[in-house]
Image (cartoon, rainbow, N blue to C red):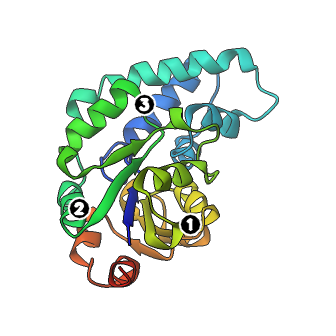
Amino acid sequence: MTRAALFDVDGTLVDTNYLHVVSWWEAFRQAGHTVPTTAVHQAIGLGSGDLVEHLLGPDRDREQDARISAVHSALYATYFERLAPLEGAADLLRTLSARGWTVVLATSATGFELTSLRAALGADDAIADTASADDVDEGKPAPEPIRHAMELAGASSGETVYVGDSVWDMKAATSASVAAVGLLSGGIPRADLERAGAVEVYSGPADLLSRLDTGVIARIGAAA
């Protein structure tokens, strides 16, 4: 039996969510839009195009979309060399890998951004594969990213757990019939994650690592 542990990266393994919030806020401001940072925060986890659509709506000037996304990317890139992993993140991945789990990252990040995230995380030895936004037609909350990551791992939904920090992560996993584990490290309230489908919620990677022998990960592991 294959056991797959799929992970979001931003806000789940690396402490980046608020850096994204500030970068998006400034990108919108430069384009003439006043978007509250709370609204931006709640949208983090969506792919760039979906995030702009979610925050500005279908009646926006779509000719601005590419420029807004480009400004966000440029601003966020200034943080690449300073990105920091969340406490326990690398140890969590290594422990799961050592226990026979296939670890796959499922993230909207691509290119040098993804390279920088992996460098900050420092756990490439435990990561079997990566499913990025470039690999699917629809990003989270659609189930496609989770299904693609499962295919890479060679696992069924019953053999898989997905760990993320946003409501979009929880909805995507639930739509793919995968057990969704939420982390509070991205700043989203527990109640919001549970309403979106989280079967368990932990404070962060270190908390989940300390409780691997209980909960849904232990149950899937015991069935192997």
Cα–Cα gap, marks 3 and 2: 23 Å
List the residue tagged with mark 3: 110
List x then y, in percent, for residue 69: 55, 23
List x then y, in percent, for residue 210: 21, 75
Q: Residue flagged by tag 1: what amino acid is it?
A: Asp
In the picture, the quarter occupied by the N terminus is bottom left
State the residue at coordinates (64%, 62%): 175
List x then y, in percent, for residue 36: 58, 40
Q: Nearer the viewer, mark 3 or mark 1?
A: 3
State which tag comes first along the sequence, 3 or 1: 3
Q: Nearer the viewer, mark 3 or mark 2?
A: 2
In the picture, the quarter occupied by the C terminus is bottom left
In this view of the protein, can residue 84 be seen by the observer?
no
State the residue at coordinates (55%, 54%): 147
State the residue at coordinates (62%, 52%): 141
Task: Report crowding for label 1: few under 14, some 14 to 19, many 20 or more residues within 10 A (C-alpha).
Answer: some
The number of discs equals 3
List the residue tagged with mark 1: 192
CB under 8 Å between callouts 3 and 1? no
List the residue tagged with mark 2: 97
Q: Nearer the viewer, mark 1 or mark 2?
A: 2
Task: Report crowding for label 3: few under 14, some 14 to 19, many 20 or more residues within 10 A (C-alpha).
Answer: some
Q: Nearer the viewer, residue 46 or 76?
A: 46
Q: Nearer the viewer, residue 31 or 171?
A: 171
Q: Residue flagged by tag 3: what amino acid is it?
A: Thr
133 to the left or right of 96:
right
Tell me the quarter of the picture where residue 167 sits.
bottom right
Cα–Cα gap, marks 3 and 1: 27 Å
State which tag comes first along the sequence, 1 or 2: 2
Callout 1 secondary element: helix
State the residue at coordinates (60%, 62%): 176
